[in-house]
Image (cartoon, rainbow, N blue to C red):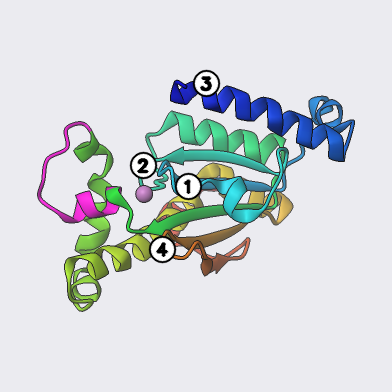
Amino acid sequence: MDSHKRLLLANKAWVQEKINLAPNFFLDLAKEQKPEFLWIGCSDSRVPAEEVTGTQPGEIFSHRNIANLVNHTDVNLHSVLSFAVDHLKVNHIIVCGHYGCGGVKAALSQQRYGILDEWLRQIKDTYYLHQDEVEAMGDFNRQADKLVELNIHEQLRNLMKTKIIQKAWIEEKRPMLHGWVYDVKDGLLKSLYTIEPGTPLHEVYQFEF
Ligand code: CO
């Protein structure tokens, strides 16, 4: 069988399974979405948000890109962020990176990967900011995993720098920001950082409202 046909068949089985458990599952979901979480994760096929968190359709609004970056020029990310925060009113934003991330490894190396090099540039900047901490880890893979963690923290800071988050923090004391890391070797998620609404940022990043 063509491999893509397997997916369509599996979909039919999945629909049946859902309906067997709850006959109105899709009818209820079709009315509206009220997700509690925005997930900003890596595109890596090994880190599917719903599967690793045991969540159902309707629970997680998500955005994924290579190396889970919050890039200030990314209109796609900012549209997702604005819709999630301003309209869906999510209470939590989870930036989830993962150990063994190919994007972070690429950024730590000197190899060229085409357009991807520009996308990953900010990870090189994060390395540059924390060079001693990364190099103290020893071999390349351990250095890359430290950089995975630092990159997650940097993306939380990038979220704090957006007007979308600053406004929601002032007006509605939400959302809480979470930095999680997933280990592809054992399937476990670990919470590394939690940032409460109202946490100060250097004033140069702070807008007046
Ligand atoms: Co990755």
Alpha carbon distance from label 4 to label 1: 17 Å
Residue drawn at x 56%, y 47% as measured from the top left: 49
Please state which of residues 143 and 197 is positioned toward the viewer in this rendering.
143
Please state which of residues 31 and 9 is positioned toward the viewer in this rendering.
9
* Image location (x, y in percent) of residue 32: 80, 29
Residue behind mark 2: 66
Ligand 1 near label 2 (Cβ, under 8 Å)? yes
Element under disc 2: loop
* Image location (x, y in percent) of residue 7: 55, 27
Q: Nearer the viewer, mark 4 or mark 3?
A: 3
Alpha carbon distance from label 4 to label 3: 29 Å
Q: What amino acid is labelled 2 in the image?
A: Ile
- Residue 6 is inside the magenta segment: no
Using the rendered view, name the quadrant where residue 35 is placed: top right
**Disc with the residue nearer the chain's start (3 vs 2):** 3
Residue 209 appears in the rendering: no
Q: What amino acid is labelled 3 in the image?
A: Lys
* Image location (x, y in percent) of residue 102: 28, 49
Q: Are marks 2 and 1 in contact (CB under 8 Å)?
A: no
**Disc with the residue nearer the chain's start (2 vs 4):** 2
Residue 5 shows which numbered tag?
A: 3
Q: Which residues are magenta?
A: 103-115
Residue behind mark 4: 185
Q: What amino acid is labelled 4 in the image?
A: Lys
Q: Nearer the viewer, mark 3 or mark 2?
A: 3
Q: Residues within 10 Å of mark 2 (few under 14, many from 20)?
A: some
Q: Are marks 3 and 2 in contact (CB under 8 Å)?
A: no
Q: Nearer the viewer, mark 4 or mark 1?
A: 4
Please state which of residues 10 and 150 is positioned toward the viewer in this rendering.
10
Query: Measured along the vertical axis of the image, is residue 14 above or below residue 165?
Result: above
Ligand 1 near label 3 (Cβ, under 8 Å)? no
